[in-house]
Image: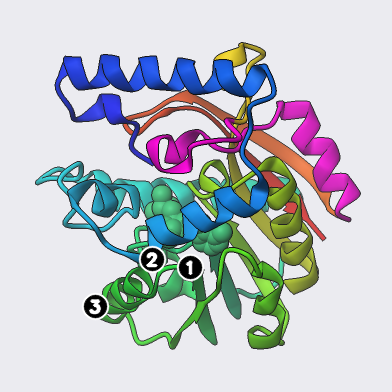
Amino acid sequence: MPSSRQHVPTARHAASLARAAWHRGLATIGLTHSERRISADAQSYWAEPADEDWKDNSHWADGPVFGNSDLWREIGRRHLELFHRGARLAEFTRPWDRIVEWGCGGGANAVHFAPRAREEFVGIDISADSLAECEKQVKGVCDTPFRGVEIDVTDPEAVLRHVTEPCDIFLCLYVFEVLPTPEYGQRVLRLAHRMLAPGGLALVQIKYDDGRWVSKPRRRAYKSGVSQMTTYPIAGFWQLAERCGFKPEGIELVPQNELDERYAYFFLSK
Ligand SMILES: C[S@@+](CC[C@H](N)C(=O)[O-])C[C@H]1O[C@@H](n2cnc3c(N)ncnc32)[C@H](O)[C@@H]1O
């Protein structure tokens, strides 16, 4: 998701960097917030479309960061190409009947993947507004049925009561970084594995920890550092995926793009 440096004046960017360093420093000396508190902050942040930053962060097509550029369309187009590359690598052959996207936001990926789903596209999100926006965008490009599933941050496992049929493809893009903690991310990975059919393929993007202390999970002050909350070392995430039952097939790295930096895409098969 867009880091503040992409579209704000330098003074505000400098303030944001200073704030990030301050919070990482406090977390390093043990002054972290509880997962319960971080989750409550996340819930209240995403539930209410507060301002233009919120639209940018939720990847709505009319968010100012996307402006009049083609960037919003590019996000999903690149992810679709990436998925095709991963599918070849993993020898993924299942028909694309049901596609699930965890944290579908304003539909930047959905508009590219939903037209290719033969049965339905399932969008999961904690924001009812983003689910409605995603559905609107999908309806604008295809007739594939869209099912929106709203969950509460504290209870991601509730998704299993709504998505009872296995999916062929699981997507989670620009979302792991905004999850409350790395431990929470593990819950999402386990759910992804539960939802996927045998032979299914997941494409999961994380922001990676490159060893510098500023790239560690933030573990406090969610609202002032939404996209800095959860990171993993690349090898650590590979092993985590294995512990969750996946077979990691490959990784593609994007050290920097128009939105932010330190992205790793994992192709995980079941
Ligand atoms: C940066 S947007 C990404 C949207 C879309 N995946 C994309 O690539 O354009 C992050 C989305 O994740 C959602 N989100 C945040 N925490 C979540 C959680 N715990 N479970 C599911 N969705 C979540 C937000 O509401 C928002 O729509």
* Residue that label 1 marks: 126
Q: Residues within 10 Å of mark 3 (few under 14, many from 20)?
A: few
Q: Quadrant of the C terminus?
A: bottom right
Q: Quadrant of the N terminus?
A: top left
Outermost residue toward the front in this view = 31
Q: Residue at x 67, y 13 (%)?
A: 211
> Which quarter of the figure has residue 28?
top right
* Residue that label 2 marks: 47
Mark 2 → mark 1, Cα distance in angstroms: 7 Å
3 or 1: tag closer to the N-terminus: 1
Q: Which of the pair 141/29 is nearer the observer?
A: 29
Whether disc 2's CB lies below 8 Å from ligand 1 is answered no
The x, y position of residue 26, in whole percent, is: 57, 20
Whether disc 1's CB lies below 8 Å from ligand 1 is answered yes
- Asked whether residue 229 appears in the rendered view, the answer is yes
Name the amino acid, label 1.
Answer: Ile
The x, y position of residue 133, in whole percent, is: 29, 72
- Specify whether residue 101 is painted magenta: no
Q: Which of the pair 34/6 is nearer the observer?
A: 34
Q: Helix, strand, or loop for circle 2? A: helix
Q: Which mark is residue 140?
A: 3
2 or 1: tag closer to the N-terminus: 2
Extent of the magenta region: 218-245
The x, y position of residue 83, in whole percent, is: 56, 52
Q: Helix, strand, or loop for circle 1? A: loop
Pair 3/2: label in front: 2
Q: Residue at x 85, y 53 (%)?
A: 244
3 or 2: tag closer to the N-terminus: 2
The x, y position of residue 182, in whole percent, is: 69, 41
Task: Give above or below for 98 relative to 31.
Answer: below
Cβ atoms at labels 2 and 1 below 8 Å apart: yes
